[in-house]
Amino acid sequence: MSQKTLKIDNGLVDERLDEALASIGAAPSRSKVQSMIRDGLVTVNDALEKAHYPLRNGDIVKYQEYAEKPLELKKQDIPLDIVYEDDDIIVVNKQAGLTVHPGNGHEDGTLLNGLLFHESALAPAAGAARPGLVHRIDKDTSGLLVVAKNDFAYEGLSAQLVGHSMHREYYALVKGLIGEDEAKIDAPIGRDPKNPLRFAVVGQGGKESVTFFKVLKRFPKDGCTLVSCRLLTGRTHQIRVHMDYIGHPLIGDPLYGAGNRKIYDKGQLLHAYRLTFVHPRTKKEVSFTAPLPEYFKNVLAKLT
């Protein structure tokens, strides 16, 4: 690991140390820069400083060239609700609260760790950090995922995902009474410029994002609506972003729709209930469903 040196001039004067290093690409993200600072891999004038240190003209910043730590994927005996399995694929109904794969803050205890315990060989084409994973759902979202056991299956499923022929349908409970019985939301999504943890509908630089929704039931007294959403595209947080964009954020969502957690406060009420695709081996269309989890049904039972 080589050391790099940065001499501060007018362009970075008064910038925070972590923001300055992130802006020049010292690490892939500001959070990773902050980790480097905490680990003592960054000095200013040969002294350790905090991430919020304000840079001054002429400061000499030295930092170790960033290198991603190798990720060791552990096999863990985590209970899985497997809906279907054959020699090529696994369809699993993920419970809410379970992260799909290891990452920052989640080195193990994920769905992928459990899948590797159940099936040691998953498609390597998906990448060393995420073998077998064709698509993902958020930690607090429950429901169906298809996982590829081999590269043949992975390539076939990924092509359907890219070509928008894999159909993913969700139940969502949203704030407010939606007037339309059904509608299409066609609005590009990109990283929220005001909050790096969020995504948002953006005017420039966003990716095509299309969500169809249909009203299933309105709850006038409690002021919320149960909808079925179908994804044409699959952007990060897509349903959560799109429903918030039209003024109907998901009930319980901790990130979108601030203050919208009186009915439920343990994460967004979102469940991937149906998954339809062409089996890569048989070339026949298959469809799988997963019932609403008990906590979701309990919330609905109390609404009027």
Image: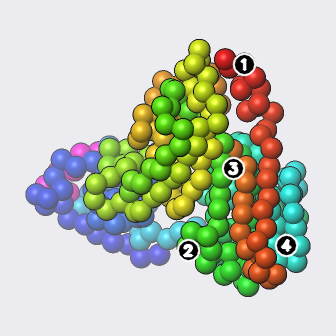
**Which badge, 2 or 3, comes first in the chain's sequence?**
2
Residue under label 4: 120
Query: Are discs 2 and 3 less than 8 Å apart at CB?
Result: no
Q: Main secondary structure of the magenta part?
A: loop
At label 3, counting other C-alpha atoms closer than 10 Å, the crowd grade (few under 14, some 14-19, many 20 or more) is: many
Q: Is residue 267 above or below residue 150?
A: above
Q: Secondary structure at mark 2?
A: loop
Q: Secondary structure at mark 1?
A: loop
The single residue placed furthest to the front in the displayed view is 181
Q: Amino acid at mark 3?
A: Ala
Counting from the top left corner in percent of width and height, residue 139 is at 65, 47
Q: Secondary structure at mark 4?
A: loop
Give the CA distance from mark 2 to mark 4.
29 Å
Q: Is residue 300 above or below residue 100?
A: above
**Which badge, 2 or 4, comes first in the chain's sequence?**
4
Where the C terminus falls, by quadrant?
A: top right
For this rendering, which residue is in front, 10 or 163?
163
Residue under label 1: 302
Residue under label 3: 272
**Which badge, 1 or 3, comes first in the chain's sequence?**
3
Residue 163 numbered tag? 2
Residue 36 numbered tag? none
Query: Are discs 4 and 3 less than 8 Å apart at CB?
Result: no
Q: Which residues are magenta?
A: 53-59
Q: Is residue 209 magenta?
A: no
Q: Is residue 123 above or below residue 58?
A: below
Counting from the top left corner in percent of width and height, residue 103 is at 61, 58
- In which image quadrant can residue 186 be found? bottom left
